[in-house]
Image (tube, coloured by chain):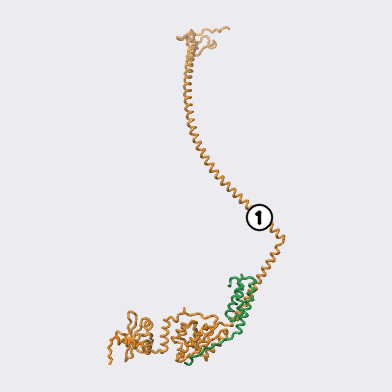
Amino acid sequence: MDVRVVTVSQVVEYLRILTESDSFLGRLWVEGEVSEVFVSRSAHLYFSLTDGNAKIKGVAYRNVAMRVQHVLTAGASVTVSGRATVYAPRAEFQIVAEFADSSGVGILALEYQRLRAKLEADGLFDPARKRPLPEFPRVIGVVTSPGGAVIHDIQTVLRRRFPLVELIVSPAQVQGAGAPDSIRRAFDHLLEDGRAEVIIIARGGGSAEDLSAFNDENLARMAFASPVPVVSAIGHETDFSLLDDVADLRAPTPTAAAELCTPDIAEFSLQIIEFEERMGRAIDMHLRRAQSALNEEVQRLDRSTPDVAIARCRTNIVELDRRLNLVITARTIRARSALDLDQTRLHHLGLRRFDNLRTDLAARRLVLGSLVLGRVAEANLACQNSHMRLDNAWSTVVASRRQSLLFATSRLRDLSPRSVLHRGYSVLLDGQGELVASIAQTRSGAAIQAIVEDGTIQGTVTSTVPIRR
Amino acid sequence: MTDIVPTDEQLSALESLAESSDFESVHAGLTDVVRLLETSGIGLNHSIRAYEIGRKLSNRCQELLDAAELRITQLDPDDLGG
């Protein structure tokens, strides 16, 4: 008997592998009441799920916890989706939640929401990834049921709207258990064919279960990876599928999808008419322009007669004359300014010379000054000589005059009455003391007095006798 | 090519589109010719030639539109009912 002893860890690890590889346990939908809710510091949410008889531990890791936290509250009846695992340290069976919602919502709806959240997180719905549809599709691929009304509607629209296109139909089973696989294969056939420039995946209206094939995760990922733009047209306008979210364009119906993928041929017919009109107007414009250019040439030819040529020559001469005047004036102005410049220079030169002269003059003045001083000294000397001579002369004159005066004085003394009196003469005065020089001045009996040298003689006139001549 | 005078080669290339069965190419050629004609810098000779080419292309467009018939291909439904 082969006995093998294993460790506790080995047993727990075996249990974990067994649990995680089980397909049923790998995708669980469990219904129950929430209890023992606990949020860890790292934001993971731990909880228990019970139906009254049994209890399962559960965990929602941080990224999921953010979405389900409001649902997983103590006492709430919920449906939790996730995979089972074994927590090794305690050999504890637990469910790792991926999604949770209040109980009562249908399982399909829950699955749809779970998958939608997952695909959105993977970026499959990113609006920035949506590609534009070709303006002029040459080939349109359609994945749909080959015999239904859908392909008929699409053909009708394309015939009416844009019959230039080629339609490639890739038939698929669009309901039932095999629908998701069938749709994916038909899609793949179209991609392999490679001609389609846009692919429509279409189905008519139906129940939620009927349309659930278009919520297939793999189909969604395939549409996301498609090198060709995908248009979804599932059910009616009110129906929504995951394919709608991933597709480059969602059409409300298959008919609308055909319209959205094609331009309208009627518009082209109108546009071609418009183009023809524009071309007609444009060529008219070019012709008119050429005509007016031609008219202008003719007019120029008319203007080219000899008279015109002579007039033009005349104008030229006037113009040349004007330019000549301009040149002469310019030269004159230039010469004048050159002259002004010379004059200025000359002026400066003159000033310099003047300065020289002034210096020269000052020097001469200095010389002259000293000369003049010499002469003045000489003159002073001469003047002093003259003074001396004058003094001498004056002394001589004074001596001579003094001699004359002595002489005159002596003569004057000789002539004095006193001298006469001395010589024996006397002076006769009347009683009033008046000089008597004539007999007429006296009369007999009048008192008289005669002045002699040593005194007076008083008397009375006895008679007067005139002298005979 | 809307703002420059076309070369003879360019005009010939546009003219050859009148033989094409691809509507998009003929339509694009017609659009170019209309723009070219509406450019004032193009001379009389070129404009007359462009006009003739434009008429050919618009006729060709109309022919293609008139003759258009939806072609339908069906791939093998190898897995239907699977």
In the depicted structure, whether residue A72 falls above or below residue A388:
below
In the depicted structure, whether residue A410 falls above or below residue A211:
above
Give the labeled residue for mark 1.
Answer: A320
Which quadrant is home to the C terminus of chain A? Answer: top right
Chain A: what color? Answer: orange
Residue shown at 48% from the left, 21% from the top: A389
Q: Is residue A64 left or right of residue A206?
A: left
Which chain does the residue under circle 1 lie in? A
Label 1 Cα crowd, 10 Å radius (few <14 / some 14-19 / many 20+): few
Which quarter of the picture shows residue A177? bottom left
Secondary structure beneath dot 1 equals helix
Place of residue A199 in the rendered image (x, y in percent of width and height, measured from the top left): 51, 84
Residue shown at 32% from the left, 81% from the top: A40
Chain with colour green in the figure? B
Place of residue A288 in the rendered image (x, y in percent of width and height, measured from the top left): 66, 71
Q: How many numbered discs, if any?
A: 1
Toward the front, the furthest residue is: A1
Place of residue A58 in the rendered image (x, y in percent of width and height, measured from the top left): 34, 86
Which quadrant is home to the N terminus of chain A? Answer: bottom left
The one nearer the camera, A237 or A324, is A324
The one nearer the camera, A358 or A142, is A142
Q: Which residue type does callout 1 highlight?
A: Leu
Q: Is residue A80 left or right of residue A159?
A: left
Place of residue A209 in the rendered image (x, y in percent of width and height, measured from the top left): 45, 90
The one nearer the camera, A212 or A391, is A212
Q: Is residue A93 visible?
A: no
